[in-house]
Amino acid sequence: MTGLDLTGRRALVTGAAQGLGEGMAAALAAAGARVAVADVQDDLGAKVAASLGDEHLFVHLDVTDDDGWSSAIGTAVDRLGGLDILVNNAGIEITSLLVDLDPAQVRAQLDVNVLGTALGLKHGLRTMRPGGAAGGGGVIINVASVAATIAFPGISVYSATKSAVDRLTRVAAMESGKLGYGVRVNCIYPGLVPTAMGAGLANDVAEIGLFGSAQEAVEAVVALTPSGRLGEVSDMADVVVFLASDAARFITGAGLAVDGGMGM
Ligand SMILES: NC(=O)c1ccc[n+]([C@@H]2O[C@H](COP(=O)([O-])OP(=O)(O)OC[C@H]3O[C@@H](n4cnc5c(N)ncnc54)[C@H](O)[C@@H]3O)[C@@H](O)[C@H]2O)c1
């Protein structure tokens, strides 16, 4: 489908030093976009950007830092000559039963997953709307989770933050449309993918006694999944390319489950 060609587009992906974000950055680059790899992990992020090629770059970005967003997006716009695609992918997950919640861990997840995504929307919309530093409209893709659509034990606060990402997406799409920003805003709900976070989650739910082992936790997830397997990084990355592309030109305010059917 020619609509999936991203030649000439400029993208920034948060949390792109590893895992899903790295895969999304690589898939956007493979589709023709020039990509700013943004992360708090400078060494790893710079390696990812270098592996994509000379026309791509690394920018340091802590998504919870309002000024950091101005600076990272400014650098991306300067170096890439604009910005058409923003993927708000950075996120953290800290497993805990509700009865054991640690307020600092709750706040950390709210900060990165909710504030980080909200600030991404703020700066992405400001930059891409008419009169902004890029100004030609564009696309924002937020990364929620299947956790926003099911009730899996041990991840209550994480699930709540991902439900918040879902609502941020819908309101952002509405504001963008009503105010003529020309920016489509959508989110995806990935199923479990064995990245550092996904594998860690399986270990942690076993460690707090919800499953006999990490393997049992994985088997429980697979048993709930009509497609009969865990997700892969490329499953998520390909959908991000689709949503970023002209093939998705009439899709905004949508949440797309990419979970093999687990959350239906
Ligand atoms: N892996 C899964 O099973 C899964 C499932 C559903 C949703 N998700 C979501 O997908 C996204 C990526 O997950 P992943 O599995 O690749 O996780 P990961 O832990 O492997 O990678 C997350 C990346 O985000 C970066 N990051 C963390 N805090 C940051 C901050 N404050 N500012 C900038 N970067 C920051 C990390 O440095 C890391 O590079 C997350 O939003 C996660 O919630 C993951």
Image: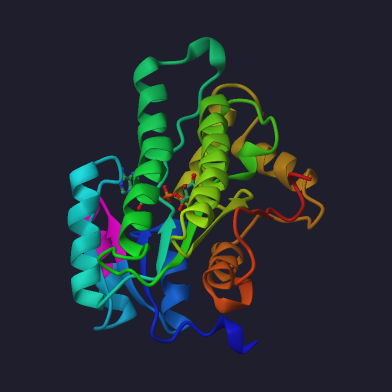
Task: Find residue 226 and report its horizontal and vertical position in percent.
Answer: 82, 53
Q: How many callouts does the rendering have? A: 0
Q: Nearer the viewer, residue 255 or 110?
A: 255
Q: Residue furthest top?
A: 99
Q: Where on the picture, by quarter, is residue 50? A: bottom left
Task: Find residue 56 and report its horizontal and vertical position in percent.
Answer: 28, 77
Task: Find residue 14 and report its horizontal and vertical position in percent.
Answer: 36, 56
For the point 35% across and 48% down, the residue is: 122
Q: Is residue 13 above or below residue 11?
A: above
Q: Nearer the viewer, residue 12 or 106?
A: 12
Q: Nearer the viewer, residue 139 or 15?
A: 139
Task: Find residue 19 and report its horizontal and vertical position in percent.
Answer: 44, 57
Q: Is residue 219 above or below residue 16?
A: above
Determine whether, in the image, residue 66 is placed left or right of residue 108: left
Q: Is residue 166 above or below residue 256?
A: above
Determine whether, in the image, residue 250 is placed left or right of residue 157: right
Give the magenta part as a residue range: 37-47
Quadrant where the C terminus lies?
top right
For the point 46% across and 66% down, the residue is: 23
Q: Nearer the viewer, residue 128 or 217?
A: 128
Determine whether, in the image, residue 137 is placed left or right of residue 169: left
- Indicate yes or no whether the magenta region holds residue 180: no
Q: Residue furthest right?
A: 226
Quadrant where the N terminus lies?
bottom right
For the point 33% across and 59% down, the residue is: 17
Q: Residue furthest front?
A: 179
For the point 57% across and 67% down, the residue is: 243
- Way the structure is coloured: rainbow
